[in-house]
Amino acid sequence: MTDQRPPALAITGLVRRYGTFTAVDALSLTVRAGEIVGFLGANGAGKTTTLRCACGLLQPDAGRVVVAGHDLASAPRAARAALGFVPDRPFVHERLTHREHLEFIAALYDVPAARARERGEALLAQLALTEVADQRLEQASLGMRQKLAVAMAVLHEPALLMLDEPLVGLDPPAARTLKDLLRAHAAAGGGVLVSTHLLEVAERVCDRVVILRRGRVVADGTLTELRGERTGASLEEVFMQHQSPPGATGA
Ligand SMILES: Nc1ncnc2c1ncn2[C@@H]1O[C@H](COP(=O)(O)OP(=O)(O)OP(=O)(O)O)[C@@H](O)[C@H]1O
Ligand SMILES: [Mg+2]
């Protein structure tokens, strides 16, 4: 049976420059509904730039971003309503409490009040934030901020969830909860694009990985596909192989 749902994310020919420097160079990638895709690449490869373009925070120089069938350029409201984004540095309001942040998101995305309350409280509990839910963010630790950013991104049950290095700063139970959340999101039919430097996480959580090098996709596939002939190779070996120019050997 073929999947009739539009992809959660379809990026084609994305280009983004900073001055004369091309940070993202004709990048295309797809995240299908129900799929978790790991977005890998060395520091400066262009992951954050791509994710910011895909959620409408940065204007691309060329290319097309379509979220759950909605073109980000021609139907920005529908596209943005269909996505949730966890940035590398969470955007929070120091004077608002955790619970107020979730109320704000619920209002922004028109989540019905009863549903918002039920889902908000469940997320706070799942992420071990219930105890601090009425404290202002100025009192929050790094991990608390990141967990709140995750709750804010998933509250409205977006078709596409994008996360930029979401595991940095999370303690082991929170990291575990986040992985469970990603799986639950995909199981419910959502697509996930997650950038990470933790190859072990990519290996265990992602259905597919896309490896970026200097703004270009150099590998895209399941771990089995990327291993190719090299049965038994770890993702680290596959990753390292794609970081050096063709023909080069070693690190
Ligand atoms: N605002 C900016 N102005 C100029 N250059 C930028 C800007 N933001 C990013 N860059 C450059 O664009 C390239 C891609 O950066 P980006 O932040 O997208 O990489 P990344 O893959 O997210 O890296 P990391 O793993 O370190 O988070 C880098 O060379 C970076 O120096
Ligand atoms: Mg980054």
Image (cartoon, rainbow, N blue to C red):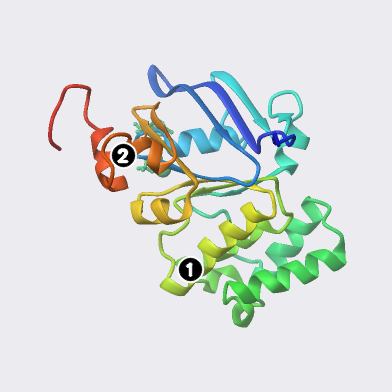
Crowding at dot 1, Cα within 10 Å, few <14 / some 14-19 / many 20+, comes out as few
Q: Quadrant of residue 127?
A: bottom right
**Left or right: where 120 falls relative to 129:** right
The amino acid type, in three-letter code, at marker 2 is: Ala
Residue sitting farthest toward the bottom: 131
Q: Quadrant of residue 230?
A: top left
Residue bearing the label numbered 1: 176
Q: Quadrant of residue 20?
A: top left
Q: CA distance from mark 1 to mark 2?
A: 24 Å
The amino acid type, in three-letter code, at marker 1 is: Arg
The verdict on label 1 being within 8 Å of ligand 1 is no
Residue sitting farthest toward the left: 250
Q: How many marks?
A: 2
As drawn, 212 above or below 18: below
Where disc 1 sits, the SS reads helix
Quadrant of the rendering where the N terminus is positioned: top right
The verdict on label 2 being within 8 Å of ligand 1 is yes
Residue sitting farthest toward the front: 1
**Left or right: where 166 falls relative to 93:** left
Identify the mark nearer the N-term, 1 or 2.
Answer: 2
**Left or right: where 152 falls relative to 247:** right
Please provide percent x and percent y for residue 218.
36, 28
Residue drawn 47% across and 42% down?
208
* Residue in front for this viewpoint, 10 or 116: 10
Residue bearing the label numbered 2: 42
Quadrant of the rendering where the C terminus is positioned: top left
